[in-house]
Image (cartoon, rainbow, N blue to C red):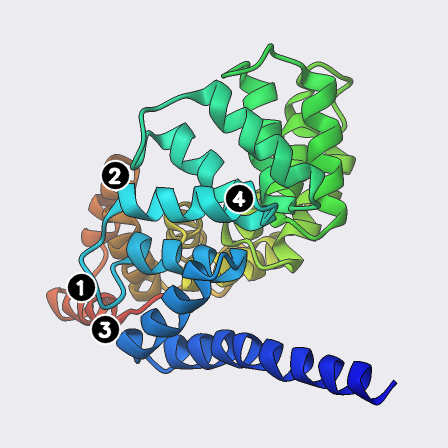
Amino acid sequence: GRAVLCGLAGLLFLSLPAVADMSTGTAAFEAGDYAKAQSEFLAAANEGKAEGQYWMGRIYEGGFGVEADPSTAFKWFEKAGDQGHADAQRIVGAFYEAGKGVDRSRSMAASWYQRAADGGNAKAMRNLGTLYLDGKGVKADRTKAISLFEKAAKLGNAKAMRNLGYIYYFGEGLRRDPEKAAGYFAAAAKAGSSRAKFDIGRLYYRGDGVERDLKRAAEHFLEAGREGDSNAQLFLGRMYARGEGVPRDRVTAYFWLTLAEAEEPRHARVLMDNLENALSDKEIETARERAKLFRPEE
């Protein structure tokens, strides 16, 4: 009995360093010590540990302490994925879909997304849903796409919530339901999606699926605009210029339109031209200086 206990203790002792190595590696990675992180991850990966292989993939994908190498990253992710690492499987799918580090193949992407989705990976469910929605790599199947989006949404995936919002908003293959769309956009916004904050803001602006409320629209646009959403910035420029849901403020309007102009030059420019007739050169310069100092919130 004592020999067995000693043997078990020995096995436990031998297994401890591998666990410590991974935690040491991730701590080093978070601290920006990529050389140390890589040595820990590589040791675990060479021992055949999926988590170590996954992290080696991330090292080479992001170029952390090494030159970025999508092909090498793919090989490491594939090794981890073959061992059932769901997020590695999702990334292998994404590499196949984009043709990154491997020849592009949407059917292979779908296959890997399916494996990851079966392992409970919400991002993979959403990615697979978009392939079924568009009929890329798989036969188009709107019902299957919606089912995958719903599963991902229940797991908190904001992009899947947004997908469902658009499906119900436009009535793609089912009865149009703006109220249901508004619910999904609001949930996605709550989950942190800047684009969904714009989407729900636009519904409040139009009174579509929700009661029209310009003040609430402006609040959502402000959140999205501060996070760098150019569509929201464009709406804010228009609303501040007209005093819709916010006090009229032409300088602030010009500030938001200056930011929006980078992505929405045609629409922003028309509004900016109108404002320039009402603003002094000093006011325009003030707005432009504010725009130069702007940094999107994370």
Q: Position of residue 45 (x, y in %)?
A: 43, 60
Whether residue 30 sits left or right of residue 178 in the image: it is left
Q: Which residue is mark 1?
A: 284
Q: Which residue is mark 4?
A: 81
Lower sequence index among marks 3 and 2: 2
Q: CA distance from mark 2 to mark 1?
A: 15 Å
Q: CA distance from mark 1 to mark 4?
A: 54 Å
Quadrant that contains the N terminus: bottom right
The kind of residue on which mark 4 rests is: Gly
Tell me whether circle 1 and circle 3 mark residues in contact (CB < 8 Å). Answer: no
Q: Element type at marker 3?
A: helix
Q: Which residue is mark 2?
A: 270
Q: Which residue is mark 3?
A: 293
Q: Position of residue 217 (x, y in %)?
A: 59, 53
Other residues around mark 2 within 10 Å, as few (<14) / some (14–19) / many (≥20): few
Lower sequence index among marks 4 and 2: 4
Q: Residue at x 20, y 45 (%)?
A: 273
Lower sequence index among marks 2 and 1: 2
Q: Element type at marker 4?
A: helix
Q: Nearer the viewer, residue 133 or 212?
A: 133
The kind of residue on which mark 1 rests is: Ile
Q: Nearer the viewer, residue 111 or 160?
A: 111
Q: Nearer the viewer, mark 1 or mark 4?
A: 4
Lower sequence index among marks 1 and 3: 1
